Image: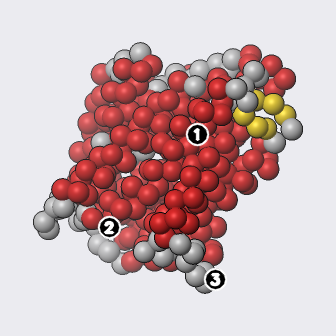
Amino acid sequence: MEDKWSWRWIGVTAVAPVSWGATYWVTREFLPADSPLWGAALRALPAGILLLAFARRRPIGSAWWRAAVLGALNFGGFFVLVYVAAQLLPTSLAASIMALAPVALAGLGWMLLGARPTGAALTGAALGIIGVVLVVGLATTVVDPRGVAVSLTALAMSSLGAVLTTRWREDAPIMASTAWQLTMGGLMLLAAAVVVEGAPPPMTAPSLLAFSFVAVVATAVAFLCWFAGLRRLAPATVGTVGLLNPVTGIALGTLVAGETLTALQLAGAALVLVGIAVGRRESRPRPRPALLRRADARPDCVTR
């Protein structure tokens, strides 16, 4: 039963990095390249409003400032930094840096949660990182140090947000907490977009469809699955599953854009899957606390 639940939550969690991998192609092909703040705001805020309509809960007490902190880490700054890094660095190098997520999550999870990673989790993370490096290749152009700094900052923000989400997991149900974070982060991005970029970019039918995908599928649904995995799997295991992000991006590039994968890249994709299989041995299904089973017993949220 334990193994069954472990794989089930790994499958749920995998929805997130797979959809994020698809976002690379959608953003590049259909979304405005010169409006990163508006692009991030139109991704986060509609997703937050959509989830709020279903969650029908509002934060009270400490949940307000926690939602603001997590919204800034998981959505606000992170969405913009990833966009900027993609403009400054070759895709292969940017993806390779973000592939360090398992190491960052395992280290922060150990420091902040006391979740010491097992040998299996560390081995799985190492195999996954090697696999991603093989898939995306190595940079062959001049590397902009600003891009490296921005990408590392994005990685640190995302990893810290993920670990803090795990640490505060009992404060609210998943849908409500995700909605609060997205809305808070989206409002921050909206204010920054108006001040810095002015009017929103013009919309076309393809861009509207693209924004719908990134807001609903790659944000609302994806982060629900991601946070669900963070509540039930070890941080190192979740980080290893996240390696499906760049692998998905490469796969879509091959299928849609006609790119060709070498034998080493195919071997790297297989190695990522092996790393996930090895690293998931650290996962343990966490029983749901009574506070999460009774809506009327939650001290940090209230039904409207």
Q: Residue at x 40, y 62 (%)?
A: 83
| Residue 120 spot, x, y in % from top left | 33, 25
**Residue type (three-letter) at the residue carrying disc 1:** Ala
N-terminal label among 2 and 3? 2
In the displayed structure, does residue 174 sit left or right of residue 296?
left
Q: Name the residue under label 2.
A: 87
Vertical side of 156 occupied by 199: above or below: below
Disc 2 versus disc 3: nearer the observer = 2
Quadrant of the frame with the N terminus: top right
Near mark 1 (Cα within 10 A), the count class, few <14, some 14-19 or many ≥20, is many
Q: Element under label 3?
A: helix
Q: In this view, does 184 lie to the left or right of 84?
A: right
Label 1 residue SS: helix
The residue mark sitting in front, 1 or 2, is 1
In this figure, which residue is indicated by the disc labeled 3?
Answer: 205
Say if mark 3 contacts mark 1, CB within 8 Å. Answer: no
Q: Residue 214 bears which disc, if any?
A: none
In the rendered structure, find residue 68 and report the number of the disc placed on it.
1
Residue 138 x, y percent position in the rendering = 17, 59
Mark 3–mark 1 Cα distance, whole angstroms, equals: 33 Å
**Residue at point 57%, 49% (across, down):** 185
Name the kind of residue labelled 3 in the image. Answer: Ala
Q: Is mark 2 on a helix, strand or loop?
A: helix
Cα separation, mark 2 vs mark 3, equals 25 Å
Query: Which is more toward the observer, 181 or 100?
Result: 181
